Image: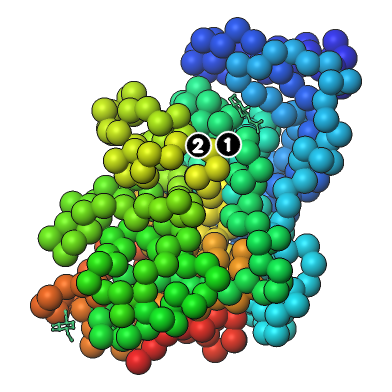
Amino acid sequence: MGSPHWKRLCLLLLAGLTSSLLLYSHYHATVEAPSSPKIIASLLQPGPLVLAPSGTPQGAGSHRWALGGSLESGNSLKPSAELEEPEPSRKQPSPCLHSVMARAKADPTFREIFHFNTPVLMWDQHFTLETWNRLKTRHVPYGWQGLSLAVVGSTLQLLNASANRQLFDRAAFPGGCVRCAVVGNGGILNGSRQGKAIDSHDLVFRLNGAVIKGFEEDVGTKVSFYGFTVNTMKNSLVSYEEYGFTQVPQGKDLKYIFIPSDIRDYIMLKSAIQGSPVPEGSDKGDDPQKYFGLEASAEKFKLLHPDFLQYLTARFLRSELLNTQYSSLYMPSTGALMLLTALHTCDQVSAYGFITANYEQFSDHYYEVEKKPLVFYANHDMMLEAALWRSLHRAGIITLYQR
Ligand SMILES: *[C@@H]1O[C@H](CO)[C@@H](O)[C@H](O)[C@H]1NC(C)=O
Ligand SMILES: *[C@@H]1O[C@H](CO)[C@@H](O)[C@H](O)[C@H]1NC(C)=O
């Protein structure tokens, strides 16, 4: 590494990239640890990954690169194992009775579907030439086709805190069994009186129009994570304002989970970390502190890895919609992505406010005053999600709240 050969190769590769890169006069390249390509290779294996990119991994050559850096000699690098270890959330078997992982491994169907080593989050060290070249061939929501290299790169570069590599710190849970509740916004929660049960979990995930005020008895008050895309967050603030969703949940210990689905998400994330107004695009002029509070720092924000979202979509929620004209619009719902994220990071997971077989008995959301039927958006597949929650519940992998 650091040899003239590498430098020549990198210069050649850089020369072929988009003009936005020309804004940057410096770069650095290092050789990536072997662990990272392995993870990517596992996502590229032939199998049920309909959404998998068509390209093949670039042999052994996987180069870490970053914008705005400078040439570094190999000697100045940290040991690669220390740098690149993706810190899977559960290296050790969990001490929990009936953990997600134990139950999944015991189930003949889910054993084949779960890949617990898939990296959940993306952070600065994932921004490699190999990753850029691979993801730019895949369209949004979970690829980078058409996205600006400068925007994506400069955003990822800010995700350099250790907190960006894991959803939560296991050391904070000495019992070793992390119990999570994921709270969807379904009408089943109206009058449920599940607030105490929800808040008794170690970590509580909420999303989109998560109204709390006035519904504490039914949905609790604790928020450890709030998950969203910029699109769903802003739509929720408009659509559910009349029900009291006037502000995104904020709090000192609350972390935000960005679901990248568009360039908007990268632009907003960068502005949020920098604590400055959005400089460009459809959210231009937005003040991120209005959404996320005054604390602007990398520690506050998590970015789901596009490969993780791709893996979830392809293996858990591969909808027939992918075979229709809506294929490029299809995404699992925000709730589904949060619940599946919890399943890949927590030891035990309870799901509240998610679609059940008797969904017709309930309103769309728990906070509506008059019953409204569940809205089926063309870009989601709620029946497939309902079937997945039912199967996961039957397999003992989640506890699905039903009534
Ligand atoms: C992360 O990057 C920022 C900006 O480049 C820098 O100021 C900060 O010291 C870095 N933090 C860590 C933990 O490396
Ligand atoms: C929710 O529950 C309250 C109190 O039980 C009831 O008045 C209201 O109509 C319910 N909302 C819906 C949409 O069912």
For badge 2, the amino acid type reads Ser
Figure check: 402 above or below 111 = below
Dot 2: within a 10 Å radius of its alpha carbon, few (fewer than 14), some, or many (20 or more) residues?
some
Q: Nearer the viewer, residue 39 or 399?
A: 399
Where residue 137 appears, as percent x and y from the top left, is 54, 36
Instruction: Give residue 358's position: percent from left, percent from top.
Output: 31, 88
Quick check: can you spot residue 210? yes
Kindly report which numbered mark, 2 or 1, lies closer to the viewer in this rendering.
2
Q: Secondary structure at mark 1?
A: loop
In the image, residue 337 above or below residue 64: below
Q: Which of the labelled discs sits on residue 159, or is there none?
A: 1
Pick the residue in front: 349 or 53.
349
Quadrant in the picture for the C terminus: bottom left
The part of the image, by quadrant, that contains residue 218 is bottom left
Find residue 361 and report its image quarter: bottom left
Distance between mark 2 and mark 1 Cα atoms = 9 Å
Residue 366 position by quadrant: bottom left
Q: Residue at x 35, y 63 (%)?
A: 380
Q: Indicate the amino acid at tag 1.
A: Leu
**Residue at 32% over, 44% down:** 291
What secondary structure is found at the residue carrying circle 2? Answer: loop
Q: Quarter for ligand 2?
A: bottom left
